[in-house]
Amino acid sequence: MAENAYPVSRSITLDSREEAVLLFGTRDQNLRMVRDALGTRLVARGDQIQIDGTDVSVDLTERAFGRLRSILRANGRITSEDVRTVIEVVRAGTGVGPGTTPSGTTTSPVGTKPAPAEGGKYLRPRTDGQTRYVQALRDNEIVIATGPAGTGKTFLAVGMAVTLLRQGTVKKIVLVRPAVEAGERLGFLPGDLVAKINPYLRPLFDSLNDLMDVETVKKYIESEVIEICPLAYMRGRTLNNAVIILDEGQNASVSQMKMFLTRMGQNSRIIVTGDLTQTDLPPTIKSGLSDVVRRLAGIPRIAIVALADTDIVRHPLVQAIVKAYDDDAPRRRPEPVVQG
């Protein structure tokens, strides 16, 4: 037998033959895309992939397959757009390289941090998934991000909004959340509207205070440059020159999600974040987040980004906790998610 001409040879063992079929793609098209882009030789045998190449190319290929397996677990499938995005991310290291973006446009190499927020703090993605998310936020007018707790969905959305506000691209930030526990009827809580909705918007405030001085946040709220609003109060409005963020989108109904998305005015952007596994709606009400992920897939200038447990950036134990719950729960596969 001839000696392997490649200096490095490694193998990946997949969980099952079914995973291999979904990972490889129709007629092994995903394998060919990775092979051609990263310069390795790939040999698929059953539930194993042998990777031959240089040390660098094999490392990149292993990283690409690790990311693709995470996307497969989260979405139940892999699209060719997913493969292209993962290839660009791993080739560029901590940034996104040139080529086709999630929105289908051609880009030049970009860094991983936009303009600084208040106090010199930067919006900096820390994982491959977060890098895809930030790129989608830059390139699209509507971005819908799903993923487990701790993946940075809310923080990066608020960070992008603050960046656009400071650049003068928009004039207003609107923070919206469904008040599911109060049935969208907030009258029995003490205080004005801000006081009533405050408990539901606390995560958004925490992100704002991480990115901006507390006094600046307070000043912006008083002058309505930053507006907080329960989802029920959005009906009938049109918001121009604004970044509108809906947090905990899984707790919006289908009709509420449609109402929210159609508030978008001229020169505005919408960001929806949520966790498809943490819906607090009654069993008889369908989540508007799972519906919109399916309904808006493939529409230009709309990106749908799925973050996975590998993108969790909180305390290291959070990732272990999420995995423990996922492993113990009945297998629940969300609607297919694509990068728009």
Image (cartoon, rainbow, N blue to C red):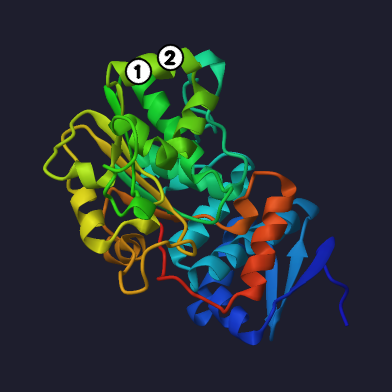
Is residue 160 visible to the viewer in this orientation of the structure? yes
**Quadrant the C terminus occupies:** bottom left
Contact (Cβ within 8 Å) of mark 2 with mark 1: yes
Q: Give the total of numbered labels.
A: 2
Query: Of 268 and 67, which appears nearest the observer?
Result: 268
- Horizontal and vertical percent position of residue 258: 21, 56
Judging by the rendered image, the residue that carries numbered circle 1 is 220
- Horizontal and vertical percent position of residue 108: 45, 36
**Quadrant the N terminus occupies:** bottom right
**As drawn, 326 above or below 148:** below
Check residue 216 in the rendering and tell me which mark sits there, or answer none. Answer: 2
Kind of residue indicated by mark 1: Tyr
The answer to whether residue 314 is left or right of residue 149 is right
Which secondary structure, mark 2?
helix
Which quadrant of the view contains residue 125?
top right
Neighbourhood count class around disc 2 (C-alpha, 10 Å): few under 14, some 14–19, many 20 upward: few
The answer to whether residue 306 is left or right of residue 298 is right
**As drawn, 104 above or below 166:** below
Neighbourhood count class around disc 1 (C-alpha, 10 Å): few under 14, some 14–19, many 20 upward: some
Check residue 295 in the rendering and tell me which mark sits there, or answer none. Answer: none
Query: Of 233 and 79, which appears nearest the observer?
Result: 233
